[in-house]
Amino acid sequence: MKWLFDRKRGLGRGSVQQHGNWREDIAQIFSVPFYESRNPDVVEAGIDPIAHYLDFGWREGREPAPWFDSTLYLRIQPELTSLDMPAFVHFGRSLRNGDGAALAWLRGELILPLPDGRGKVVHTAFPRPLASTIKLLSDHVDKDYYWSRRPDLRAAGTDPVLHYILLGWKEGMNPSAGFSTEFYLSRNPDIREAGINPLLHYLEVRHKEEWRQVASVVDAAIFNEFDDIAMKQRVAAAVALDPMVALPDQPRRVTFPPLQYGALGAAAEAMRTAVGPTPAPVVVLLPHVRMSGAARVAGELTRALAGIDGTDRLLVVTTEEASFEYPDWFPEGIRLLDLSAFREGLEPEWAMRLLFDLLRGVGARQVFNVNSRLAWDTLRVYGRQIAQECLVASYLFTWDESPRGARVGYPIQWLRDTVDHHDLILCDTARLADEIRARFALDGPDAARVTTLYTPAPEPTPERPASDAGAPQQAADGVPKRVLWAGRFDRQKRVDLLIAIARQMPEVEFRVYGKPVLDDTPLAAGDPPPNLLELGTFTRFDEALDPLPDVFLYTAQWDGMPTILLDAAGARLPIVAADVGGIAELVGPETGWLVAPFDDVEGYVAALRAALSDPADAARRATALQARIAAMMNRPAYARDVAEARTAALALRQATRTDPQG
Amino acid sequence: MTADITAIVTGHREGRLAVASLRSALSAVAAARSEGRRLELLLILDRPDPATRAVFQRYSAQADGLQEVDFGDQGMTRNAAITAASGARVACLDADDLWTEDWLWRAAAFLDRHGPGVIAHPAYNYFFEGQATIFRHIDQDDPEFSADFLRVVNYWDALCLCDRDVHLSFPYAARDVDAGWAYEDWHWNCETVAAGLRHKTVPGTVLFKRRKPQSQTLQASGSKAMMRRSRLSSYAQAGAQGSTA
């Protein structure tokens, strides 16, 4: 194409030498008063306005003259943006070279390249539109749509926005699929008579003149069909039968499901394609597989189910995030689906429908929800129906507590709304299971709907020599006893208690690992004493075992079955822990020291002193705890318990539910 | 009598709103007869209130039958009427909606041209009273049609014309809002699409649908009802169907 202004004449990237040339190009047309009036910072700094413009101003969007619009200039010649030079310099040079188009610009005209219909491009001058008009319409002219309907304009490099403003609307062009030019002009004849650009008018008055009729291109075709004489007669006949047909007396809108729900349909298709036709009678739903107790439990549950049903009958679905960072937690060869990718951008209710579609699509007969927010939300809305088609099981860990002490979370509000849609509620502690049975009167035959599953414990830390295990070194002279504390520095874990305990035991070294996760208060905010050492975080528990601690301390206000306790027990550390959640199911007088209430600082101090003063007793309790965990929390027992719980739930279901399909 | 088309008007508690609907049905039946079609008009009431019963009785003399059932279920009511129908084809109208005079004969002529296995829908539903919209029905042969979409969003309502045998093979499922099941028309659409039937729109036709704030559809969506599982629900079936069935 021919350039509106010749860009090839000696243009290049800025340099000291080129600045000299640039200055010559614009010296005669640069408006110093204008620049100074708009840029008092330049005046205040005492910088020469032209130098400032060439060095900085043009990059900062500062204009060199009241009649020049760099944005518009570049709009009609977008290729100039790659030259890395001020548009005004290009213009000034074109002017000096006697370019007619530059002179036209000076006259307030704009030269637009246009196809002449015979394969050539002619340059035509138009009154230059207001920059505000161009800005307003820019977001509403679909360049691809426009050019797809006028390939000749694309070939000529004609800017669609400028073309629509100057010519297109008069030629009946639509700026996008969303606005019919002809429809607006035909339904608003005052605008046609006034010769006003219809899109500009609509954008300016849409909030003030809501009675104006506007339509997309497709809708306009439908409205026009309803203007057809035969269709008008049909409507008139209906109105004659019932005048209410004409109401509400307002402009009609066209609705078409693919327009309103297209994203949901596309997601359903993409997900169905990704999953394929192979059924999955058992589906495990979880938020993601990042470092979290729930994800690890989901892995154990999947492993147990796969052991019973076979890997090929299972589908594991992440619903909130794509992360699958710990594949080793799951059995090899398991089918995975990241539903979060398909629900992205969908309204919450649509995401629920997508999940429902997935369950039906794969022929799910059993659904296990392990902390999936989407699953919980879907059970709240469609739990009645899903429960009629599938066995519904949800895993519950501990609830959370608000800063004011209210219990919140899946075991509270979500379970309240969905308890009757559940065939099986799996709890990681007996204390939680008992609490839920009591709260919802799930007794008698219904008691089987709530089951405690003790998560298989990690393998005991293997690296330590047998002689070390459970036999902390006697403190040599001057070497303090060591207490290990590891966890999140969050409200739940009551770091304030840890600090208070450490203050009361200045002779003991408190080795503390962790960081704030849910809250953002650092440990230092609690003004810890010097015998409390903050040691950062570890990736493996055994990193915290050198030097070997004498006791592991666990503080918390509420909890389930903390994994860190299992790690400590695996390392055969004596344990002093708060009596919260399911901890008492492991730790008692035979297996450690339990402190109640959870905030009894004196109680912790007494227990720690007891453990530290009698290493042999401490070692005996640690060994007993390890044995208890080995007996309670192992994979064979877990798999057996999962199988038994499911069998009981299926039997109960068979006795109480009917399949909606008959 | 064996009819070409049985026109069915189902009533419930519409009261005098049914007058316009029944008059529109009579006009459509008369127009189809004048086009040479043999028409049967069946009126059916499901747990009606006295006002609706009175209106239907007022027009029963111009119909070929008035039946009363006790289902409390729109789909079951239609099934009963279809079972009683003698027409080779059937069309249903709810007693608060309006047919146009030319709907029945135009839809019949359309089916004549497009052969068996086709279900004819009006091109548009013109919603009135509570809503000023024109709902555009999609034709299954439209490139925008997707069976995957139909699994998650409904395309068509039940006020279509098709062979009676289609309904006998695929009766409407029971509605049970307490148990969470509704949208029997959506379910029927899924079942028929899965069976290979084709839903098409009759150009230039429109159905007038009253949208009241308390319509059954809105009630169902407020209580988060869902359609029952259909043969289209399975990915194995949907995959075989293809995205543009």
Image (cartoon, grey):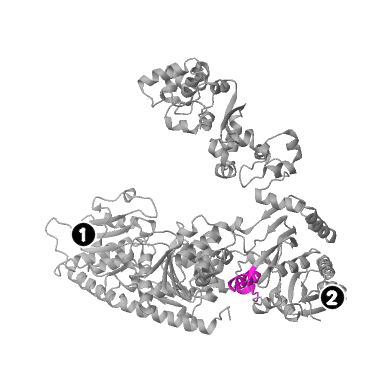
Residue B63 disc label: 2
Q: What stretch is highlighted in magenta?
A: B174-198
Choose mark 1 or mark 2, whichever is in front: 2
Residue placed most toward the observer, B242 or A579? B242
A9 left or right of B90 in image = left
**Tag 1 secondary structure:** strand
Asked if residue A444 is positioned above or below residue A475 in the image, the reply reads below
Q: Quadrant of residue A329?
A: bottom left
Residue A214 disc label: none
Name the spot of residue A569 as percent of width and height, x first: 26, 69
Extreme-front residue of the structure: A118
A431 left or right of A384 in image = left
In the rendered picture of this protein, how many numbered marks are placed on residues?
2
Asked if residue B87 is positioned above or below residue B135 in the image, the reply reads below
Name the spot of residue A37 as percent of width and height, x first: 52, 19
Q: Which image quadrant: the C terminus of chain A?
A: bottom right
Residue placed most toward the observer, B170 or B1? B1
Tell me, yes or no, if residue A624 can be seen here.
Answer: yes
Q: Mark 1 lies on which chain?
A: A
Asked if residue A48 is positioned above or below residue A557 in the image, the reply reads above
Residue A482 disc label: 1
In whole angstroms, how far apart are the C-alphas of marks 1 and 2?
Answer: 95 Å
Q: Is residue A584 magenta?
A: no
Extreme-left residue of the structure: A477
Name the spot of residue A327 as percent of width and height, x first: 33, 65
Q: Which amino acid does label 2 sit on?
A: Ala
